Image (cartoon, rainbow, N blue to C red):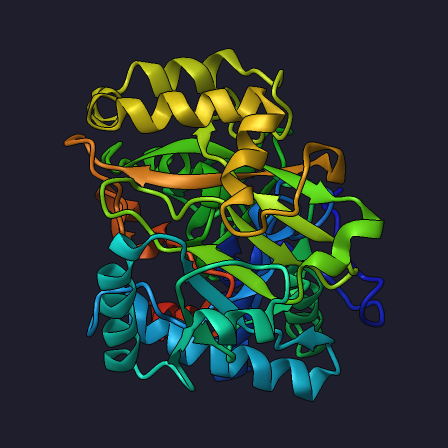
């Protein structure tokens, strides 16, 4: 029997046929399902999630930052969607009564040679129409963050924090309230276009696409949209798509300030990013529960959902290390990678990085915290895929499936804006 999440809404009659099925119960899949059903209330929609709960992986294991759009290339899709998405996120939370904290962010230069890069970020942010940006002096840094030291900072007061799992579950409530069906514990393992109706009737062929799970259960639909995150490449392969770009999982381990030391940090404190390296670097992130996360690092995860150092999946590991694109990335960033691995093992090494910003911090002030796994799309040339990738299947199913193969960070911040773009793409491809 198929499982339906029904605790959010009154029980409703469920059948196993839908006009459109969305695969993936993370924040992007849920936002997209919500947007589609609000646009097309006369159609039937189902959402499939392989876990027993929604928003269980990336959407429930992230920093919780509402980004303002500073880092991204002016005019790029990421820049536009982040700026739009942040405004939509704040508005949505206000309407739904979801708590957030617009605590701001400082990108802090701790060395004089970082100032040109900081000023370039400021100009980029202005071009992206990021709200209320300004450069501030060392004295102004301390007025905002009394324990932080730096020579200059970029102040982004529009940056905030929120619990994205709560936001994602609210999207699910919206979806169900207007008739959407959510099926959990349904891991999609196969999809195909049926040659004949199981009912032996013309009406049965109204839903020609068969979607099966690992337990042999199946549903039928007209169209499929996949937003599968860490498994987007494998799910795409099922429908005959290319294996590229591959998903290579990177784990980010956080430290946490001890509760009695959380007074050291008021808002987000970030380093000036080094263009030589592919990730932003360690930072200070306040959380909605009052805790403060420090980090993360970035190391290869040996399991796509491996949140612990010793988590290991032979298939996931072999998939990653057998991919030439990963080795090209590793060889280009060998010193960065070795440093990340060292800091992952040695607590004092990570604290030393953090002390550049808050000198008072000591090893005794921190605890090892949670981890997240980032679904990083990687091309065969070893370059991180930094934009959205849409793909379709081949053969009979090709015109009936849309794979969202990459929805890069900051996907949570941008989720409502991304959902509008995905819905536009769905309407264009499927003629809804």
- x%, y% of residue 197? 46, 48
State the image quarter where residue 350 is shown: top right
Q: Which residue is the extreme one toward the front? A: 139
Taking depth in this image into account, of 399 and 59 the one nearest to the observer is 59
Q: Residue at point 44% right, 28% down?
A: 340
Res 207 visible: no
Asked if residue 386 lies left or right of residue 260, the reply is left
Please say if 325 is above or below 411: above
| Up-down relation of residue 394 to residue 408 (above or below) | above
Residue drawn at x 23%, y 80% is 127
Is 166 left, or right, of 317 in this rendering? right
Total tally of numbered discs in the picture: 0
Where residue 196 appears, as percent x and y from the top left, is: 41, 44
Identify whether 98 is placed above or below 361: below
Which residue is the extreme one toward the left? 381
In the image, 153 versus 162, the foreground residue is 153
142 or 57, which lies in front?
A: 142
């Amino acid at each position: 029997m198929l499982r339906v999440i029904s605790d959010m809404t009154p029980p409703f009659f469920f059948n196993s046929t839908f006009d459109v099925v969305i695969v993936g119960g993370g924040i992007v899949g849920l936002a997209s399902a919500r947007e589609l059903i609000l646009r097309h209330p006369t159609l039937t929609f189902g959402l499939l999630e392989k876990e027993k709960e929604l928003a269980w992986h990336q959407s429930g294991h992230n920093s919780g930052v509402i980004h303002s759009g500073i880092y991204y290339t002016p005019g790029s899709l990421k820049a536009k969607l982040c700026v739009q998405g942040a405004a939509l996120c704040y508005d949505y939370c206000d309407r739904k009564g979801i708590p957030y904290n617009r605590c701001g962010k400082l990108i802090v230069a701790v060395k004089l040679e970082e100032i040109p890069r900081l000023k370039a970020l400021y100009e980029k942010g202005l071009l992206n129409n990021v709200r209320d940006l300004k450069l501030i002096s060392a004295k102004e840094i301390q007025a905002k963050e009394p324990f932080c030291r730096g020579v200059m900072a970029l102040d982004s007061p529009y940056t905030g924090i929120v619990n994205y799992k709560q936001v994602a579950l609210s999207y699910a409530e919206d979806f169900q309230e207007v008739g959407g069906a959510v099926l959990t514990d349904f891991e999609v393992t196969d999809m195909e276009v049926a040659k004949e109706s199981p009912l032996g009737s013309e009406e049965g062929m109204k839903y020609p696409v068969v979607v099966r799970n690992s337990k042999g259960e199946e549903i039928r639909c007209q169209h499929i949209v996949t937003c599968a995150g860490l498994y987007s490449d494998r799910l795409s392969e099922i429908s005959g798509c290319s294996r590229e770009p591959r998903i290579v999982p990177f784990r980010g381990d956080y430290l946490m300030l001890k509760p009695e030391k959380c007074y050291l940090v008021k808002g987000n404190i970030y380093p000036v990013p080094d263009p030589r390296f592919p990730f932003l670097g360690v930072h200070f992130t306040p959380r909605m529960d009052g805790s403060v996360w420090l980090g993360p690092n970035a190391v290869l995860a040996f399991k796509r959902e491996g949140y612990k150092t010793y988590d290991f999946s032979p298939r996931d590991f072999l998939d990653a290390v057998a991919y030439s694109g990963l080795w090209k990335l590793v060889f280009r960033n060998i010193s960065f990678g070795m440093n990340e691995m060292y800091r992952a093992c040695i607590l004092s090494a990570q604290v030393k990085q953090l002390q550049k910003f808050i000198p008072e911090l000591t090893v005794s002030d921190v605890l090892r915290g949670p981890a997240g796994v980032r679904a990083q799309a990687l091309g065969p040339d070893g370059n991180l895929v930094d934009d959205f990738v849409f793909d379709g299947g081949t053969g009979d199913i090709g015109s009936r499936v849309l794979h969202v193969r990459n929805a890069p960070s900051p996907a949570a911040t941008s989720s409502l804006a991304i959902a509008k773009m995905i819905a536009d793409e769905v309407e264009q491809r499927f003629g809804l």
